[in-house]
Amino acid sequence: MTRRAFAIGTAVSLMLAACHGAAPSQADGAADALAVPEDPVFLSLSQAITGHPDLDSVIAARTAQAFRQLFPEVAATFAPLAALARQHPDLTALLDAATPAQREGALAVVAAWYTGTVGTGVTAQAIAYADALMNRPVADALFPPTYQLGGPAWWTAAPPPVDARSHAATPDDAQQTAGKSHV
């Protein structure tokens, strides 16, 4: 064995020994994020006031936890609001029956689901940016902002050509559909 091979082997061994266990793994972070206990009351309230029955229970639990940490007075309105939501399935009736504090809580919950954050400014907690409800209406055509669509400078390439013929009606199409009802 040469001195060079020995020095390289020693350096690599020392580096591996120094790095072993120094940083938590991504799996540990994922386990911490999933360790938040589910909150069925907040989830049912969220489904009632957003009109989306398919909300994610993990995101709901993390959102409820953020409210409890940042805005405990708002979080205190969730159980009474959920009870009101069971009595008043119509959102307008629910808001009419709610107290002013409960209305503010309901609006804060809707804002959290649509923006994916709880709070504003430097104390805000980002919960689910890519899964925020504001992204659903355009999900078929747009990626969430800041998500890169391709490699570096992907936007500088010319877009694919548009085949206008495939989108325009031809005279043959007009004759075939002239006698048909489009109801």
Image (cartoon, grey):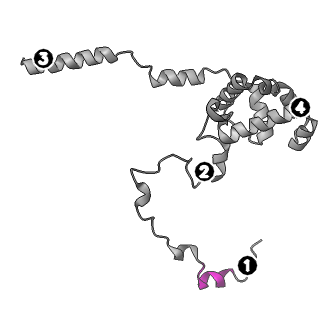
Q: Position of residue 24 (x, y in %)?
A: 45, 19
Check the image and report above or below for 161 versus 16: below
Q: CA distance from mark 2 to mark 1?
A: 34 Å
Q: Which mark is residue 91?
A: none
In percent of the image, x 89 and y 43: which residue is there?
A: 92
Amino acid at pointer 3 = Phe
Give the numbered dot on residue 180.
Answer: 1
Label 2 with label 4: CB-CB less than 8 Å: no
Q: Main secondary structure of the magenta part?
A: helix
Quarter of the figure with residue 41 = top right
Contact between labelled residues 1 and 3, with CB atoms less than 8 Å apart:
no
Nearest to the observer: residue 177 or residue 60: 60
Q: Is residue 79 above or below residue 141?
A: above
Left or right for 153, reference 137: left
Q: CA distance from mark 3 to mark 1?
A: 85 Å
The image shows residue 96, relative to residue 16, as above or below, that is: below
Instruction: Using the image, determine if residue 141 lies above or below residue 70.
Output: below
Image quadrant holding the N terminus, namely top left
Say which label, 2 or 4, has the lower sequence index: 4
Distance in Å between CA atoms under marks 2 and 4:
32 Å
Q: Tell which tag, 3 or 4, sits nearer the viewer.
A: 3
- Spatial separation of the CA atoms under disc 3 and disc 4: 73 Å
Residue tagged 2: 139
Helix, strand or loop at label 3? It is helix
Residue topped by disc 4? 84
Q: Is residue 41 magenta?
A: no
Between tags 2 and 1, which lies in front? 2
Q: Which residue is mark 3?
A: 6
Q: Bounds of the magenta span?
A: 169-177
